[in-house]
Image (cartoon, grey):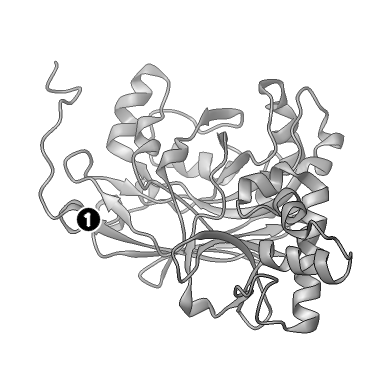
Amino acid sequence: MRLVTFEDTAQRSRIGAVAGDARIVDLHSACALYLRDIENENAFERLAEALVPPDMLALFEGGDTSLEAARKALDYALSNDRAMGPGGENIFYPAAEVKLKAPIIPRKFFHTAGNFREHHEEATKAGFSHPVMPWIVFFQNVDAIIGHDEPVIYPEHLTNELDYELELAVVLKKGGKHFSSEEAAERIGGYVIFNDITARDIQRREMKSGVFSFCKGIDTFCPLGPWIVTADEIPNPHNLAMELRVNGESRQRSHSSKMSVKIPEILSHYSPMGYSAGDVVSTGTVSGVAAFSGDPKAWYLKAGDVMECEIENIGILRNRVISWEEAYGRKAAALVTQESLG
């Protein structure tokens, strides 16, 4: 399934699945219909609320039980092509009539890095201040998450070096701690595209202290989407072509097979921190970022640029960069910086 969070025509937040004809199926309403028609449940509305709630985090917190209920609901809706739910509400929505949002807002976003050796090699060649080796992790700011076609706001008063990083991310359907890499697969619920927007000038200043977070956690710096593809549809996540384009020009092009540390190892390694169902774990970026190119100034993002992140068997996550003034209708006020404090 390709699972989405969307706003319907009444601007209600719903969860759905993308059908083969690109229509969006409201999974909560479809589940209620399935329970009423097939399971003959009198309390179909209450049971649908528990099994397939209209919230993606709650769906993944339901684990295999909820995901299987969602699949049955989708199959039933598609087999009947029913236009209305049990309360007379729509089940099918044309894609053009809804607004996709970030597919999930997790409780925790484990941001891992250094898992593609090619990224470390390009950083070293460019003379970056620190090696980009495996086993880097920090928590992403979940309030910075945006969805497909939502704008990345360029904070010109904070940075002059806005960069992109294409990543494959994992969505967990089962929590746990202290588990082996062999036990990791049973916890993977799906995969999603992540664009790790980074202010490189801020990052260099932060890394003087050996840490970084602010440079990647600023508002709108976490595009995620366009949907979550369930794990059954991607049997081998290490066999996916990956490409990021800016204004149609290819910037990053690689393959998930080039991970030097594989996903089960990543999940196991950080499991002592404890996962919850619905948590997101990123897996690091590939080569081709602006900062390590031959001409960083030309490649850094600018207002008006359109980024397209594509991963095979998942889709395309598209986001436009807009200026602070376009976003807020005014210029930004200057903030206290590290340099101004001496």
**Residue 90 location, x and y as percent?**
60, 75
Q: Residue at x 13, y 43 (%)?
A: 332
Q: Quadrant of residue 141?
A: top left
Q: Quadrant of residue 277?
A: top right
Tell me the quadrant of the picture where the C terminus can be found. Answer: top left
In the image, what residue type sits under mark 1?
Ala
Mark yes or no: residue 242 visible: yes
**Residue 156 location, x and y as percent?**
18, 46
In this rendering, the answer to whether 40 lies above or below 217 is: below
The foreground one among 150 and 282 is 150
Q: Secondary structure at mark 1?
A: helix
* Left or right: where 162 falls relative to 87: left
In this rendering, the answer to whether 185 lies above or below 72 is: above
The foreground one among 78 and 274 is 78
Residue at the extreme right of the image, as rendered:
39
Q: Quadrant of residue 158?
A: top left
Q: Residue at x 88, y 65 (%)?
A: 40
Mark yes or no: residue 238 visible: no
Q: Residues within 10 Å of mark 1 (few under 14, many from 20)?
A: few
The foreground one among 293 and 152 is 152
Q: Residue at x 68, y 73 (%)?
A: 85
The foreground one among 159 and 139 is 139
Task: Say how many tags the image has.
Answer: 1
**Residue 322 location, x and y as percent?**
25, 59
**Residue 220 location, x and y as percent?**
36, 48
Tell me the quadrant of the picture where the N terminus can be found. Answer: bottom right
* Left or right: where 251 falls relative to 263: left
Q: Residue at x 52, y 28 (%)?
A: 138
Query: Residue at label 1?
Result: 327
